[in-house]
Amino acid sequence: MAIDLFSSDHEGAVISEINMTPLVDVMLVLLIVFMVTLPVIHDAARVQLPHASSQHEDLRTAHVDVAIDAAGEMRWNGEALDDPAVVGRLAAAAKIAPQPEIRLAADGGVRYERVARLLSAAQSAGLTKVSFVTDPNAM
């Protein structure tokens, strides 16, 4: 049964629909207020930031290439050295500020004992940056 809202028979009937007109009016007023105030807010705070100048800093760390071949021979930046000379150079490198990075490239056929002795000597000398150079295509 449909209720006729304009008939005189149902004067006390409750209207169950929401009247959207006041809601649309409020939304339009808010939209206009925001449109007017946004340019004012945008230019309200002018901040002068400090200017900084910097020079190019070389961020590459110094490094030393240490290689151990399959026979156990050690090379310091390509120069063949015996064990006492390598230990002396490790101690000298530990005293440099900042410490250079030791890049260790060991042959796959070298005994691990040889590599472990070099790592122990580097730790005893006080070196903290030791990295391993690997060949991803070796496997």
Image: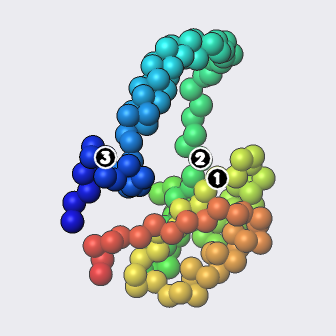
Q: How many marks do you count on the picture?
A: 3
The numbered mark, 3 or 1, whose residue comes first in the sequence reads: 3
Q: Can you say whether 117 is above or below 60 in the image?
A: below
Q: Residue at x 49, y 26 (%)?
A: 30
Residue under pointer 1: 100
> Does residue 88 show up?
no
Give how far apart the Cα atoms at labels 2 and 1 are. Answer: 7 Å
Q: How is the image coloured?
A: rainbow
- Element assignment for label 1: loop
Q: Can you say whether 93 is above or below 31 in the image?
A: below
Q: Position of residue 75 (x, y in %)?
A: 51, 64
Q: Nearer the viewer, mark 2 or mark 1?
A: 2
Give how far apart the Cα atoms at labels 3 and 2 are. Answer: 93 Å
What type is the residue that disc 2 sits on? Thr
Q: Residues within 10 Å of mark 1 (few under 14, many from 20)?
A: some
Most extreme residue toward the left, as rendered?
A: 1
Residue under pointer 3: 8
Q: Position of residue 28 (x, y in %)?
A: 41, 26
Q: Residue at x 71, y 47 (%)?
A: 98
Residue under pointer 2: 61
Q: Position of residue 11 (x, y in %)?
A: 38, 49
Asked whether the beta carbons under mark 2 and mark 1 sit within 8 Å of each other, the answer is yes
Q: Residues within 10 Å of mark 3 (few under 14, many from 20)?
A: few
Q: Position of residue 76 (x, y in %)?
A: 55, 60
- Element assignment for label 2: loop
The numbered mark, 2 or 1, whose residue comes first in the sequence reads: 2
Give how far apart the Cα atoms at labels 3 and 1 are. Answer: 98 Å
Q: Which one is nearer the viewer's eye here, 13 or 95?
A: 13
Q: Is residue 83 left or right of residue 9?
A: right
